[in-house]
Amino acid sequence: MGNTEKQSVTLKVNGQEHHLEVLPWVSLLDALRETLHLTGTKKGCDHGQCGACTVLIDGKRVLSCLSLCVMKSGRNITTIEGIAKDNVLHPVQKAFIDHDAFQCGYCTPGQICSAIGLLNERKGETREEIQDLMSGNLCRCGANRGIINAVMAVKQGVYE
Ligand code: FES
Ligand code: FES
């Protein structure tokens, strides 16, 4: 028999601490969406293949569907709801709007978190490299060109 006891977790999301009791197999994605009602983070495949669930943990991009909630206790988690500060959009958000980097918007929260993680990694100098480094985030609407243009523009310092 597996462990069916709930465990205490402190999730620090967008600067706010939440104390949860969760079963050991609950994903970070489900805890965010279903317990904390932060539904900006999307569930696409739930199997690590689409990137829709990407969040930032300590500034690094992470697939929340493949992360166990109980293992992220105390870490700094940022979801799309925490990206803008004091009603001011993050440069990546501004660039996505200006470059038509979305259509239906379903992949967009994950794309934006992934792009910010990529900028933090200080990788991706060329368009091809950025395309490669963003390839874990799928867009079924085909907004990829706009997405790459937006990331390029931020890298080139067009947005503050
Ligand atoms: S929902 Fe996590 S990668 Fe698709
Ligand atoms: S904007 Fe629709 S899936 Fe990317």
Image (cartoon, rainbow, N blue to C red):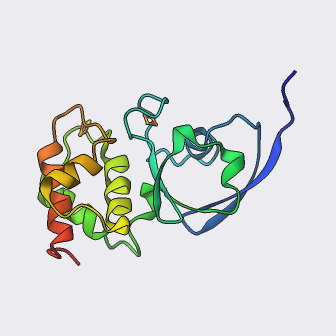
The foreground one among 122 and 154 is 122
The foreground one among 112 and 117 is 117
Q: Position of residue 115 (x, y in %)?
A: 31, 57
Which residue does the image show at 70% across and 34% down from the upper left? Answer: 25
The answer, for residue 149, to whether it is visible in the render is no
> How many numbered discs?
0
The foreground one among 53 and 40 is 53
* Quarter of the displayed picture in which ligand 2 can be seen: top left
Which residue does the image show at 58% across and 46% down from the upper left? Answer: 32
Question: Eyeballing the image, is 4 above or below 80?
Answer: above
Which residue does the image show at 36% across and 49% down from the upper left? Answer: 109
Q: Position of residue 118 (x, y in %)?
A: 33, 60
Q: Is residue 124 left or right of residue 69?
A: left
Q: Is residue 100 left or right of residue 104?
A: left
The answer, for residue 38, to whether it is visible in the render is yes
Q: Position of residue 6 (x, y in %)?
A: 83, 39
Of the 4 image quadrants, the one containing the N terminus is top right
Q: Is residue 91 left or right of residue 50?
A: left
Of the 4 image quadrants, the one containing the C terminus is bottom left
Question: Eyeballing the image, is 103 above or below 80?
Answer: above
Question: Eyeballing the image, is 18 above or below 44?
Answer: below
Q: Position of residue 74 (x, y in %)?
A: 69, 63
Q: Quadrant of residue 27?
A: top right
Q: Quadrant of residue 89?
A: bottom left
Which residue does the image show at 45% across and 42% down from the upper left? Answer: 53
Which residue appears farthest toward the top when viewing the image?
A: 1
